[in-house]
Image (tube, helix red, strand yellow):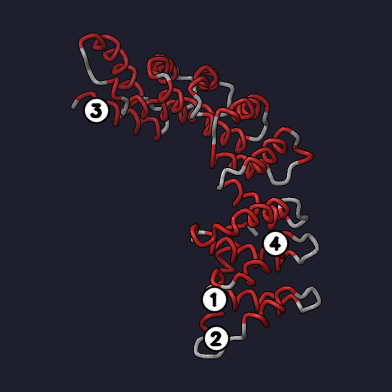
Amino acid sequence: MHPKNYRAEYTAELERAAARTAGTPSRGTRELVSIIRSTSADVQQRLAAIREVSAGDPLSKPSVIKALLKIVETDEEPAEVRLAALTTLEQVSVRMAEFRPYQADFTAALRKATTSEDSVLRERAMDILALDKDPFVQELLEQGLRNPDQASVAPESALRMLGYDAHAGHYDLLQDIVSTSDKPKLRQMALGLLAADSSAKNTFAKIAADRTDDPVARSTSAVALQALAPKEFSTLARTIVADEDDDDGVRATVLTALTHDQSEQPTASRRSTQSSMVDVVRTIGTSKSASAQLKAAARDYLARHDS
């Protein structure tokens, strides 16, 4: 189960538990903590106790928070119990001022949970740490991407988490993925993150111009190039759009980008070049072989040019 789905399911269960216990006396904190901590108690009893304390105000009970932290950091605990404890801690951690005394212990517990054999718990802990830009988990994610046999999570998940705090330290790794990966989705994600790197314009230009490359990767690269190097994009875009043998999807994406490019506003110095481009686009509009997507992009371009 994906961590986000688990959280939604667990939150819903908390609401159901609160509804069931509304109007009835709850068990005391000491009794609930005793059950939560008890490794000999039935798992379902422990989960019920966690739900019960979660339906109240766990942060007002230090013994509850300490018990939950201990569960999250303990490898021998059942994964279901650790996940339930983690969910409650994650929910109350948003009250940052009140949770601050426990933050360091929570981070330490999460780091220990990254070694869990349970993939859901492992990914959930790493995701929370990555959101907090934790250097420990960032290093763990990078190592996993560079050495897949040692990875703690799937490469797509690792890239998603690194994307929470994309910075120059990751760009070499992203370049490696773009250059060597045979997984289109992973490569596409890396391209998306690499778009923040101003020095990557040559990479985007090369991919966008390569007709043998994946069309989706080419389209992503073309749009990224437009943001990083508008002049280079404009020159390349005209070449792609005019090439009848190129992929229609890529041509349509590039033409749409040209349509909305502010630098394409008519001026005297651009009139000759634009006139030539308009002729090309008019030909696309009347072509029998052009795709509907490309023809639609052509109509939009002409409408803007003629307005």
Residue sitting at the far bottom: 24
- Rendered image quadrant of residue 118: bottom right
Classify 10 Å Cα crowding around label 3: few (below 14), some (14-19), many (20 and above).
few
Q: Which residue is mark 4?
A: 72
Give the numbered dot on residue 304: 3
What is the secondary structure assignment of the residue under circle 2? helix
Circles 1 and 2: CB distance less than 8 Å?
yes
Q: CA distance from mark 2 to mark 3?
A: 63 Å
Q: Which residue is mark 2?
A: 21
Residue 302 percent location from the top left of the image: 26, 26
Q: Nearer the viewer, residue 42 or 89?
A: 89
Amino acid type, callout 4: Val
Amino acid type, callout 3: Arg
What is the secondary structure assignment of the residue under circle 4? helix
Q: Which residue is mark 1?
A: 55
Residue sitting at the far front: 101
Q: CA distance from mark 1 to mark 2?
A: 9 Å
Q: CA distance from mark 4 to mark 3?
A: 58 Å
Q: CA distance from mark 4 to mark 1?
A: 19 Å
